[in-house]
């Protein structure tokens, strides 16, 4: 067992870090099933703005979701090089979340997380566990609280 600053590696947790609207976000790596390139999808006309469509992955159908509006960001303009993080067992269903780019997996100690209050908008704050300084203060990782995100009216109304 390795020790870093008096703490064991077993105490470390890991974030899957991605970019959305020019900002870094992270989610518990244990909550993601896989990361895929943007698949062919079928748009959903007359649906709420967060539902971009549905896609088939190995015989399973998943909703393709843009969480940007939930976080108070402008709706995502889908680009051919976008990525999708497939989240499993979130609010009893699986979804594909649209992101601009996947960065890396970042290990951290839970005590390193800071409160987001004052660093983000009030709307975004309620969907974050906190923020993590990553390679300097200018690179904050906004750690998503997936339980809060996926209990929003916009998602639950269509699940």
Image (cartoon, rainbow, N blue to C red):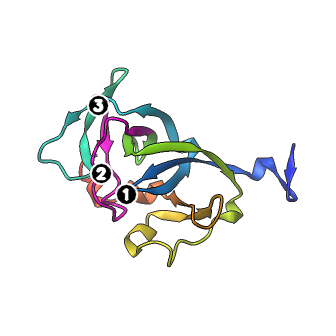
For the stretch drawn in magenta, what is the main secondary structure?
Answer: loop
Q: Any mark on residue 19, and which?
A: none
Distance from label 2 to label 3 (Cα)? Answer: 17 Å
Left or right: residue 68 compared with residue 22: left
Image location (x, y in percent) of residue 36: 43, 32
Left or right: residue 113 compared with residue 32: right
Q: Do the residues labelled 1 and 3 touch (CB within 8 Å)?
A: no
**First in sequence: mark 1 or mark 3?**
3
Q: Any mark on residue 55, and which?
A: 3
Instruction: For label 2, count other residues whose C-alpha is less than 10 Å away and answer few (under 14), some (14-19) or many (20+).
Output: some
Distance from label 1 to label 3 (Cα)? Answer: 22 Å
Q: State the extent of the magenta-drawn residues as a range.
A: 61-86
Seen at 24% across and 48% down, the residue is: 158
Instruction: For label 1, count other residues whose C-alpha is less than 10 Å away and answer few (under 14), some (14-19) or many (20+).
Output: some
**First in sequence: mark 2 or mark 3?**
3
Q: Mark 2 points at which residue?
A: 76
Image quadrant containing the N terminus: top right
Whether residue 77 is in magenta: the answer is yes
In the image, residue 134 above or below residue 53:
below
Quarter of the view holding residue 139 = bottom right
Image location (x, y in percent) of residue 135: 65, 58
Q: Name the residue under label 1.
A: 151
- The answer to which of 88 and 101 lies nearer the viewer is 101
Quarter of the view holding residue 111 = bottom right
């Amino acid at each position: 067992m390795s020790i870093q600053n008096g703490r064991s590696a077993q105490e470390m947790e890991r974030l899957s870090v991605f970019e959305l609207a020019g900002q870094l976000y992270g989610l518990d790596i244990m909550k993601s099933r896989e990361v895929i390139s943007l698949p062919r999808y079928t748009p959903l006309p007359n649906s709420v703005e967060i539902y971009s469509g549905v896609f088939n992955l190995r015989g399973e159908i998943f909703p393709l979701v843009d969480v940007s509006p939930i976080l108070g960001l402008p709706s995502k303009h889908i680009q051919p090089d976008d990525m999708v993080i497939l989240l499993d067992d979130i609010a009893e269903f699986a979804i594909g979340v649209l992101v601009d780019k996947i960065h890396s997996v970042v290990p951290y100690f839970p005590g390193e997380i800071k409160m987001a209050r004052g660093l983000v908008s009030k709307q975004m704050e309620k969907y974050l566990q906190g923020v993590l300084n990553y390679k300097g203060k200018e690179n904050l990782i906004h750690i998503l609280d997936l339980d809060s995100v996926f209990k929003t009216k916009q998602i639950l109304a269509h699940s």
